Image (spheres, grey):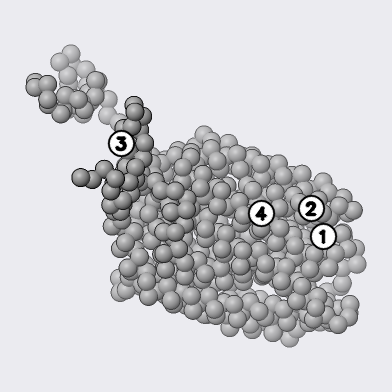
Amino acid sequence: MSRTDVSADTTPFFSDDNEGEGPTDNGVVSPQPEEEESASGVSDRRAKVTVIVLCYINLLNYMDRFTVAGVLPDIEQFFSISDGKSGLLQTVFICSYMFLAPLFGYLGDRCNRKSIMCVGIFFWSLVTLASSFIGKEHFWALLLTRGLVGVGEASYSTIAPTIIADLFIKETRTNMLSIFYFAIPVGSGLGYIVGSKVNDVAGDWHWALRVTPGLGLLAVFLLFFVVQEPKRGAIEARPEHTLHRTSWMMDIKALCRNPSFILSTFGFTTVAFVTGSLALWAPAFLFRAGVFTGEKQPCLKVPCDNSDSVIFGIITVVTGILGVASGVQVSKKLRTRTPRADPLVCAAGLLLAAPFLYLSIMFAQASTVATYVFIFLGETFLSMNWAVVADMLLYVVIPTRRSTAEAFQIVLSHLLGDAISPYLIGVVSDSIKKSDSYMWEFRSLQMSLLLCSFVAVGGGAFFLATALFIEQDRHLAENYVPSDDAPIIVPKRGRSTKVPVSSVLI
């Protein structure tokens, strides 16, 4: 063999060339691999188990987030707080979650994602447990611990979808993301149901916050021993070493020049605004409507009547499953006719949800049954967005920027969405309220919640605008080639250093 033969330098020292070709010279048959790994470095069976584990953790995240909403009347009575202060419980959590998302997005594009999630979820479990031991004189401590819970959720929510994106492609990826995002409405609904039921059994709302920490520790165990870190972008025949990693500022600039990403993020912000408002205030609003109409007794001591939280939780679970599934299926059918299917489905979901949410709020004092029917229809259409928006982000952004894009979307959607909406609804309610009568407690919250319907219409407009750019931006992401002046590695005094291409061209 020639000394200049390239194959001589690249062939492994112990070659597997004879594997699977029958007996060798000594008559020993080489063992066949049990299951062939995909380009991601993770077998198909392991990839599916990974999605199941990630779904379980996502469900726990949302279950914990909405447990507080399920026992909100008890918390208000326990601490003797106003609507504005009640809204802060959700706002401080979302703010910490939002501000830490960019950090974890940056780390998720550059470090081992499984390790980041393990540490974050372990911290989240401990802080949630600590929040269940707070006395009535320390409302500030409850606010602090709810804010720290956002640390754990930020470490997970920015990273988990990118792992799924590196395990599957095309229709399979869409299906897996839809399964992953089923956990949002299901977990939210379970938060209401478990929180209120544990509160009823224990006679103390603190016990409602002690359910998810133990399940969180189990999630860390499963994440550490079951989930395998896939290779970034390899499943798309574009492994991460062929895509130049750029600086965080360059990533942000590239995302800001991506109109589909920006417009869909604003559209998703309206979804976050509406869901954040309803998640915290809907059970309390339904309870006040019952008191106003004489169907329920006012909450004068804990535990309060939390039956509305259970019913709203069941509605959230069912509508979430129906909404996510129908959104994905309608999008699949429509893709055969137009490449703009995804943003059009999202727009239709919001525009259809708006009138039903309006009717549910206005019918509260007239008919409880009609109110629940309209809430059911409104939440079903609203839930059509979850998996479709996530899929859009993944196919209009290149693999090495996806965690950063997830973090950017989390920051913007929460900053202008559910970080301010619960507190804003509470403040508006307090400002409208003319007295402390049960009638004004109901009417003021009713008027403030009407804002959600108009925000949903604005979200539909953003997704319609996204449809104008989605085809072009998807093509650019799928055919992305680093610019001619992108940094490359050249030797310099015995070490490697990055320099622009233009500086070495002759």
State which mark lies toward you, 4 or 1.
4
What residue is disc 2 on?
142
Quadrant of the rendered structure where residue 447 is? Answer: bottom right
Residue beneath the point at 83% across and 68% down: 82
Whole-Å distance between the Cαs marked 4 and 1?
21 Å
To which residue does mark 3 refer?
490
Question: SS for tag 2?
Answer: helix
Pointer 4 residue: 96
Q: Amino acid at mark 1?
A: Ile
Answer few, some or many: residues within 10 Å of disc 3's Cα (few below 14, many 20 plus, some between 14 and 19): some
Q: Earlier in the sequence, mark 4 or mark 1?
A: 1
Q: CA distance from mark 4 to mark 2?
A: 14 Å
Q: Residue at the far left: name it.
A: 2
Along the polypeptide, which appears first: circle 1 or circle 2? 1
- Where disc 3 sits, the SS reads strand
Image position of 468 (left or right of 270): left
Q: Residue placed at 39% from the left, 51% from the top?
A: 399
Query: What residue type is disc 2 on?
Result: Leu
Q: Position of residue 424 (x, y in %)?
A: 71, 71
Label 2, label 3: how far apart the Cα atoms are = 54 Å
Q: Which residue is mark 1?
A: 75
Marks 4 & 2, CB-CB < 8 Å contact:
no
196 to 359, vertically: above or below: above
Which is more N-terminal, label 2 or label 4? Answer: 4
User: Which mark's residue is nearer the viewer, 1 or 3?
Assistant: 3
